[in-house]
Image: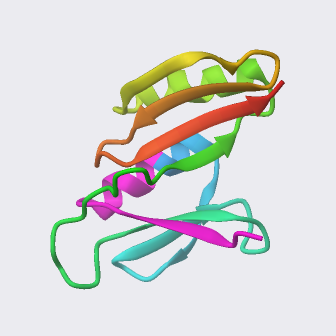
Amino acid sequence: MIGYTTIGVKDIEAAKTFYTKLLGADVQVDIGRLAMIGNSTDEPMIAVCQPYDEQDPHPGNGVMVAFRGGSQAGAAALYNKAIELGATCDGEPGSRIEGVFYGAYVKDPDGNKLCFFDFS
């Protein structure tokens, strides 16, 4: 099972604010250039970090982090909250596979692609 997923960011403080507010979670581990955000270190987390090689971070093509919405309404609510926090739309909320998968897609302020989803 996934323990955490790491994404590169330019501004660690802005990223911590974006993800703690978006997910209603807390910083569980903070070592300066990397912070792990979640509800507990015993549950999956998202880690935001300034790259170790000190080069600019860049999202990978085809790389995406998906967060369960809990319902279609929950996925749409996360999408809307992300937009309010400065994310950009990369696919409005809606059914992707009718009766099976509902998804909403954004890119965070650093360009990392996120999905908020529900299996219908």
Q: Does residue 28 lie above or below 39 as drawn?
A: below
Counting from the top left corner in percent of width and height, residue 49 is at 37, 70
Across and down, in percent, residue 88 comes to: 34, 28
Q: Would residue 77 appear left or right of 114 to someone viewing this image? A: right
Count of numbered tags: 0
Instruction: Single out the residue that lies furthest toward the front.
Output: 97
Residue 30 lies in the magenta-colored region: no
Colour mapping used in the image: rainbow
Q: Quadrant of the C terminus?
A: top right
Residue 96 point in image, percent of width and height: 64, 21
Picture quadrant where residue 39 is located: bottom right
- Give me the residue at 37% from left, 49% from top: 112
> What residue is drawn where x is 43% and y is 32%?
106
Work out which quarter of the rendered image holds the N terminus and state it: bottom right
Q: Nearer the viewer, residue 86 or 64?
A: 64
Report the span colored magenta.
Answer: 1-18
Point 68% across, 33% down: residue? 117
Could you tell me residue 15's position as x and y percent? Answer: 38, 54
For residue 102, side relative to residue 65 (left or right): right
Residue 74 picture quarter: top right
What residue do we see at 37% from left, 33% from top?
87
